[in-house]
Structures are given as structure tokens and as C-alpha cells.
Image (spheres, rainbow, N blue to C red):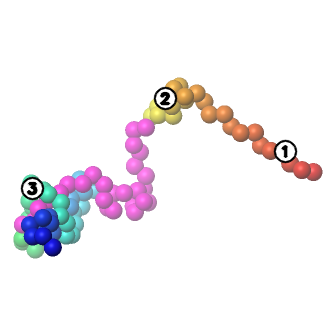
Amino acid sequence: MKSDIHPQYRPVVFHDVSAGTSFITRSTIATSETVEWEDGNEYPLYKVEISSASHPFFTGTMKIVDTAGRVERFEKRYGRRKSAEAPAEDS
């Protein structure tokens, strides 16, 4: 293998800003911030919007995202979707 072409694989603290939780794992992500972890060592810090601590699939709660008017705008641009007629039943 060629030397000096691979990114540095090191422990990184990921901080979920919406849930306020942090976890440490190994990563190659580039960061400019650092934070002191519970063990007293300083690690690179990367802030994320969503993690397993705040994602609706893992928490079972739904966060309402501002989507008001999306369906109405779609229908205005492309017209209302026509529903398919149900096929006749054989008697």
C-alpha cells in the first residue's frame, strides 16, 4: 500500500445538537473543534443534527417538520391526481 494517502482513523466525539447527547466512536472525519471527554482526554468534536438519540425511528416520536403547503404547491403545479376507478366485480 502507498503510505500517507489514507485519512487518519481516530476516536471522534459526535454531538447531537437536537438531543444534547454525545457519543465517541472511531472515524476519519475532519474536524476543527475539540472537546474534553469523560475520561479526561481531548478528542475532535463533530456536531450532527440527527443521531439515534433524536431520530424518530429510534425514539418512537415524530418531530413535525415545516411542510405546510407542499402538497398544495404540487397540486397547483401539476394538477390534482386522478384516482383510478375500481374494477367491476364479477358476480
Q: Position of residue 27 (x, y in %)?
A: 19, 66
Label annotation for residue 88? 1
Within the image, what quadrant is residue 35 found in? bottom left
How many marks the image carries: the answer is: 3
Instruction: Name the amino acid type tagged 2.
Output: Arg
Residue at x-position 86% and y-position 48%: 89
In-front residue for pair 55/11 = 11
Between marks 1 and 2 in the image, the one whose residue lies nearer the viewer: 1
Residue at left 55%, top 28%? 78
- Position of residue 84 relative to residue 23, above or below, is above
Q: Amino acid at mark 3?
A: Glu
Select label 3 or label 1 by which is in front.
1
Q: Quadrant of the N terminus?
A: bottom left
Determine if the magenta segment contains residue 65.
Answer: yes
Towards the viewer: 10 or 68: 10
Mark sitting earlier along the chain (3/1)? 3
* Kind of element beneath mark 3: strand
Residue 37 vs residue 14: left or right?
Answer: left
Q: Which secondary structure, mark 2?
A: helix
Disc 2 to disc 3, C-alpha distance: 41 Å
83 in relation to 45, above or below: above
Bounds of the magenta segment: 42-67
Q: Which residue is mark 2?
A: 73
Residue type indicated by callout 1: Ala
| Residue 33 numbered mark, or none | 3
| Residue 1, above or below 7 | below
Q: Position of residue 64 (x, y in %)?
A: 41, 45
| 10 part of magenta stretch | no
Q: Earlier in the sequence, mark 2 or mark 3?
A: 3
Residue pushed farthest front? Answer: 2
For the point 27% across and 52% down, the residue is 49
Where is residue 51 drawn, in percent x and y?
31, 59
